[in-house]
Image (cartoon, rainbow, N blue to C red):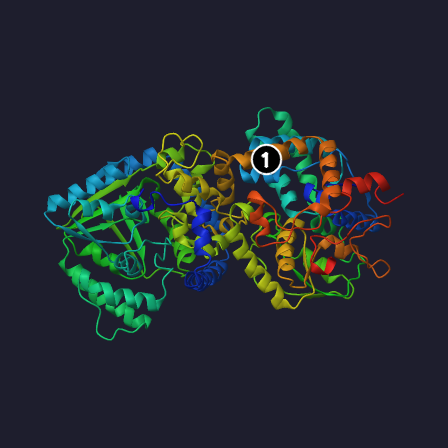
């Protein structure tokens, strides 16, 4: 994945700083709660939401089980329609292919449709190394790019920014990238959107190459589908002479019939709308246009081999789990050290990076994201809100617990867990431990030492009772004596 | 009906008053209560922290201990959810059919207290009296795991003198999450700050829940802040009557400090 996250500390450390950032907390609280409410309203108004959700799950599972077959069908259909299909095993190969295709056009700049796959592989940075400038055209991605920042949300990448911050970014940076912000720009959302429109319009008209991702690929016809709100995607997909789409292999759907389900699930789950403003579909190359499809694996087939973890590949990147997650709301997206933050990121990132496990520990240098990735499955209280809202019923808590079992455990924790297990193995040991605790209860300090100080930093410990329940039961026959 | 009480390790060790309240309540409703003394822990902490082997060992022990009872009642939504939802998964991963059979036999008979009262015994008025203003926190495993819905509210609605006030943001996690509370203390505390804020906004005297581990976290924060709001397990409120308002002290012979996870008021 993208190099910007290399060497980042583990989640708890990142989150500890984030929770004290009042501006971030304020922005996130407002934004997540607004979208959360909208999603709940539009999902709740469909009487067959549960059935749709189940259909979405079934279609994705079926496709993933037959991925080899459907991918070949897609390749054939895209080729037949005049497109060229490229296969990329990892990020480096995908970046190499895309850079080569852009260089072959003789252009040194490209416009981009918002795409998670290209962020996952760090495409913009890779293109920059080859002297190619990639211009983001989604409003929020533009804010992130102009601000030298990185995205903190899948759907609304600049969710951590409020409008006055955006105004500052536009005023200070737009000029360096193209048309400057208008004089006297205010932080009125309409004024900000208009400034972005003017800035981007020049870019659309001047660009010969566009790079996109896709929300869905339909195997039977070789059609790609992009859902968006702003119309920038439509501009990028239609104006330039060369279109390159980088798409994860799990984005496949067998037929147009299947798409019907997802065109209901995705907008309602992501933006909380009944329907998104722009839905673009294209099949192969349009007349006078060159079309390349780069099919990206980058760890996906390895995830597919894990019977529990593979359900993460059902994800349609709607972000409903982010917006409802109490941990995400307080820690923000950057704490997750990945383009995929929140609950889905906590299960997707370590799996795609093949990192954060005992097995991978020796393979990776400490400077990589291995400590961060090992901490991600623990970045959840397992409250289950993410599973409840997921439109394709990914049991995120189940995968989190599954990944925790593979993660390296701190020594003190391992010893503590082993000791607790030993005590719980025999009731007599538990009873003795309880009696010891009862006798020592007066000496228990108000602030506990070591890792347990994490409890007493913000909470009192309960009074230890003189007698455990089992001893009371034994002494009184359950209160009958 | 012969009912086995699964007290849970946390209640057994730290909140025996809750256990005594469950015994009092179930007897008052005509149940014969057994306490299989070989019980220890369901293994939830081990499983959720990434130690499935230890969890499986404890799960095997649990199914041995509780085989053969009509029903197993536990005053913890998360432990009930562990047995009902996670044991079948552990059984699928474990070799041999005997454990899977034991899980299939025992797990469906394990009930969280509100569920047992409403669904199995069919009561919502348990004859309790508790003249106080109470807010109820539904806890994640009860709400989204066991899907207890309005059962706790119906039980509290049947309590004489009790004024139930709605808790804003009730469905949001308090931030306990087992070892999450110490592995991610900053986020856990930030979540609890919001929960406590919402509790205070209700003007309630008592915060009630059906899981003492969540209450230990919220109650510990309330107590640290000298907020003067008490936390109580649902069982303790349901056990209280006009004749015996000393909730949590439960059956007559009880000793020790009663009420649940404890607050300034209880000290």
Look at the image and tell me in which quarter the C terminus of chain B lies: bottom right
Image quadrant in which you'd find residue A90:
top left
Relative to residue A118, is residue A440 drawn left or right? right
Question: Which one is nearer the viewer's eye here, B139 or A460?
Answer: A460
Task: Identify the residue at the far left of this view.
Answer: A106
Task: Identify the residue at the far bottom of this view.
Answer: A184
Relative to residue A356, is residue A430 drawn left or right? right
Question: Which one is nearer the viewer's eye here, A179 or A13?
Answer: A13
Q: How many marks?
A: 1
Q: Which residue is mark 1?
A: A417
Residue A141 in picture, x, y percent from top left: 29, 57
Q: Is residue B125 above or below residue A255?
A: below
Look at the image and tell me in which quarter the N terminus of chain B lies: top right
Residue A177 in picture, x, y percent from top left: 19, 60
Q: Is residue A417 above or below residue B77?
A: above
The kind of secondary structure element at disc 1 is helix
Residue A174 in picture, x, y percent from top left: 22, 64
């Amino acid at each position: 994945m993208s190099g910007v996250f290399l060497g980042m500390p583990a989640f708890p450390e990142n989150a500890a700083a984030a929770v004290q950032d009042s501006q971030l907390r304020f922005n996130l609280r407002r934004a997540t709660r607004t979208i959360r409410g909208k999603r709940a309203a539009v999902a709740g108004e469909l009487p067959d939401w549960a059935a749709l959700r189940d259909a979405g799950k079934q279609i994705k599972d079926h496709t993933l089980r037959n991925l080899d077959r459907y991918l070949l069908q897609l390749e054939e259909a895209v080729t037949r329609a005049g497109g060229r299909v490229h296969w990329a095993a990892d990020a480096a190969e995908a970046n190499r292919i895309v850079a080569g295709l852009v260089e072959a056009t003789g252009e040194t700049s490209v416009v981009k449709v918002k795409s998670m796959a290209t962020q996952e592989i760090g495409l913009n940075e890779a293109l920059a190394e080859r002297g190619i400038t990639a211009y983001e055209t989604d409003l929020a991605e533009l804010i992130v790019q102009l601000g030298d920042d990185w995205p903190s949300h899948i759907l609304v990448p600049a969710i951590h920014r409020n409008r006055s911050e955006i105004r500052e970014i536009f005023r200070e940076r737009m000029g360096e990238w193209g048309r400057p912000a208008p004089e006297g720009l205010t932080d009125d959302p309409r004024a900000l959107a208009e400034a972005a429109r003017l800035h981007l319009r020049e870019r659309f008209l001047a660009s010969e190459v566009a790079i996109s991702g896709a929300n869905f690929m339909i195997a039977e016809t070789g059609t790609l589908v992009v859902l968006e709100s702003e119309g920038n995607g439509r501009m990028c997909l239609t104006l330039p002479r060369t279109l390159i789409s980088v798409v994860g292999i799990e984005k496949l759907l067998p037929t147009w019939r299947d798409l019907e389900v997802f065109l209901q699930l995705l907008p309602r789950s992501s933006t909380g709308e009944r329907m998104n403003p722009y839905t673009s579909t294209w099949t192969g190359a349009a007349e006078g246009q060159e079309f390349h499809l780069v099919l990206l694996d980058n760890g996906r087939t390895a995830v597919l081999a894990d019977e529990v973890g593979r359900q993460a590949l059902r994800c349609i990147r709607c972000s409903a789990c982010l917006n409802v997650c109490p941990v995400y709301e307080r820690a923000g997206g950057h704490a997750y050290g990945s383009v995929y933050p929140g609950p889905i990121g906590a299960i997707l990132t370590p799996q795609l990076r093949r990192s954060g496990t005992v097995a991978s520990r020796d393979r990776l240098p400490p400077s990589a994201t291995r400590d961060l990735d090992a901490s991600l499955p623990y970045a959840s209280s397992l409250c289950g809100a993410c599973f409840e809202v997921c439109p394709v019923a990914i049991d995120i808590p189940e995968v989190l617990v599954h990944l925790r079992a593979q993660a390296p455990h701190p020594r003190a924790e391992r010893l503590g867990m082993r000791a607790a297990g030993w005590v719980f193995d025999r009731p007599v040991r538990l009873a003795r431990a309880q009696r010891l605790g009862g006798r020592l209860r007066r000496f228990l300090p108000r602030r506990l030492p070591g890792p347990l100080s994490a409890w007493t930093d913000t909470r009192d410990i309960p009074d230890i009772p003189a007698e455990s329940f089992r001893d009371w039961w034994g002494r009184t026959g359950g209160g009958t004596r | 009906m012969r009912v086995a009480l699964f007290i849970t390790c946390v209640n057994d060790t730290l909140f025996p008053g809750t256990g005594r309240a469950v015994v009092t309540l179930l007897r008052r409703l005509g149940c014969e209560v057994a306490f299989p003394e070989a019980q220890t822990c369901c293994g939830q902490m081990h499983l959720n922290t990434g130690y499935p082997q230890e969890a499986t060992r404890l799960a095997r022990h649990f199914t041995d201990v509780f085989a053969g009872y009509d029903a197993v009642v536990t005053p913890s939504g998360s432990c009930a959810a562990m047995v009902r939802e996670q044991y079948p998964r552990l059984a699928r991963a474990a070799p041999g059919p005997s454990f899977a059979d034991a899980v299939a036999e025992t797990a469906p008979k394990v009930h969280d207290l509100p569920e047992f009262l409403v669904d199995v015994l069919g009561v919502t008025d348990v004859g309790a009296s508790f003249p106080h203003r109470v807010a109820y926190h539904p806890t994640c495993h009860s709400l989204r795991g066991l899907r207890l819905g309005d059962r706790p509210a119906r039980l509290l609605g049947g309590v004489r003198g009790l004024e139930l006030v709605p808790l804003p943001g009730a469905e949001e996690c308090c931030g306990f999450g087992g070892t999450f509370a110490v592995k991610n203390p900053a986020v856990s505390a930030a979540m609890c700050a919001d929960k406590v804020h919402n509790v205070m906004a209700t003007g309630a005297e008592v915060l009630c829940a059906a899981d003492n581990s969540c209450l230990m976290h919220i109650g510990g924060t309330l107590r640290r802040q000298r907020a003067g709001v008490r936390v109580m397990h649902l069982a303790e409120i349901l056990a209280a009557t006009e004749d015996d308002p000393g909730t949590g002290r439960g059956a007559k012979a009880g000793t020790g400090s009663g009420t649940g996870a404890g607050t300034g008021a209880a000290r």
